Image (cartoon, helix red, strand yellow):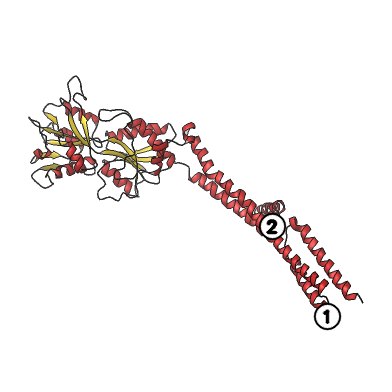
Amino acid sequence: MGAIRKTRFTRLQAMFQEVFGLGPAAALSTISLISLVTIFAVFWFFHSAPPNTITITSGPKGSIYQRNAEKYAKILARNGVKLKIIPSEGSVDNLKKLTDPKFRVDIGFVQGGVSKGLNIDKLVSLGSISYEPLFVFYRGAVPIDLLSQLIGKRLAIGEVGSGTHTLSLALLAANGIEPGGVTALVELDSDAAAEALPGGKVDAVFLMGDSVSTERIRMLLRTPGIRLFSFTQAEGYTRRINYLNRLELPKGSIDLGKDIPAHDVYLISPMVELIARPSLHPALSDLLLEAATKVHGRAGILQRRGEFPAPLEHEFRISDDAGRYYKSGKSFLYRILPFWLASLANRILVVFVPMVVLLLPGMRIIPSLYRWRTKSRIYRSYRALLALEQDLMVHYAPEKREELLGRLDDIEKVVNGMKVPAFFAEQFYVLRGHISFVRGRLMNDAQSP
């Protein structure tokens, strides 16, 4: 088998020598260049293919994060991409997974304002995808309009690792309520907190969509004796905490027949961003943003149609691929072809077209350089021969015969030592004939009386 391969390679080398007029070394260099470029192109062709599976860290079971991830999975599946969904405790947990290289996750839902203490420099945002309103429910005969009025109460602020917990602590601290004080801060998960409030185990609960189902929110809105806190100071909160937004829940928007809520309610809300590792493939970035547009782009009680996704930079920079998508949408091939076919065509254009562009000049340059080098050696011998013949014609004297013969022998020795391809055989033999011609003249002049 080895002998057969060697014979094939020898034939290939001989073919390059004959077709391009190359010597053995130049032919070997040309074959090596083509082989290396081809190997690299094939490797890059397969290496640059988008993976058919990506992993998202979502949220607790039943949360809006979990349901949105499932919607993404259905949309991506239409393009042959599987979305693996990993449950989590919420935004903080998602961000910890994304920043820890030990966890194999590609993307995650992250609420604004939860990155404190974490190194997020290597993460990028695909954009803001929704508001994440905070709902504060409390028991009371009369409404309250300041969070400071909850001092001394039992407050369920969410589990550690959830966006609810992080934002609740920030808001309470702004109202002079700190852990360890007279106010009991209870770290319950959202479902347990939603059940504890009507039962009188806590006086107020802080709930957000990353950790509680929409059904729980609607249930509390309809529960007698439970009130939804209205952030009358919402504008002040947004000025103090720059990642918050002021939202309005209109009167009757939950249930027009029962007039729930019975008056306009002001809420505060960070935004949720779709955060990714920078290694996310550009084609998958486009697919995810297309899915985000379908899932989050519709109008809702708290948002306008087409408001999300949006390239709004907060704590994370917008990725270059996402920035391109927001400006011009999907690339041309991905707009007109199925995903798998567009990916194949795109890689062919990106990998093999540059390979051809690189090889064609290379295959021209190497033979040209080799021919120039061979011609230079032949011309150098011709120059020495012409100089010798000129000396023979102008300055010849019998006593110089031995010197001229020595010079001619040196020229002939150099020429006989040349290794030239068949392409230069004619010039080579013509040179040798001219050497013989000059030698003949030199010998004839020496024999003349």
Circle 1 residue: 399
Please tell me whether residue 83 is drawn above or below residue 447 in the rendered image: above
Please tell me whether residue 399 is drawn above or below residue 349 in the rendered image: below
Circle 2 residue: 371
Viewer-proximal residue among 197 and 368? 368
Q: Amino acid at mark 1?
A: Glu
Label 1 Cα crowd, 10 Å radius (few <14 / some 14-19 / many 20+): few
Give the side of residue 204 with respect to residue 72, left or right. Answer: left
Residue 265 drawn at (x, y percent): 17, 30
Q: Residue at x 23, y 39 (%)?
A: 244
Count numbered badges in the picture.
2
Label 2 Cα crowd, 10 Å radius (few <14 / some 14-19 / many 20+): many
Give the side of residue 437 with respect to residue 82, left or right. Answer: right
Residue 407: quadrant of the picture: bottom right
Viewer-proximal residue among 157 and 398? 398
Q: Amino acid at mark 2?
A: Arg
Tell me if I can see residue 82 in this picture: no
Q: Residue furthest bottom?
A: 399
Tag shown at residue 124: none
Frontmost of labels 2 and 1 is 1
Residue 315 drawn at (x, y percent): 29, 45
Q: Residue at x 20, y 22 (%)?
A: 255
Tell me if I can see residue 32 in this picture: yes
Residue 156 drawn at (x, y percent): 15, 39
SS at mark 1?
Answer: helix
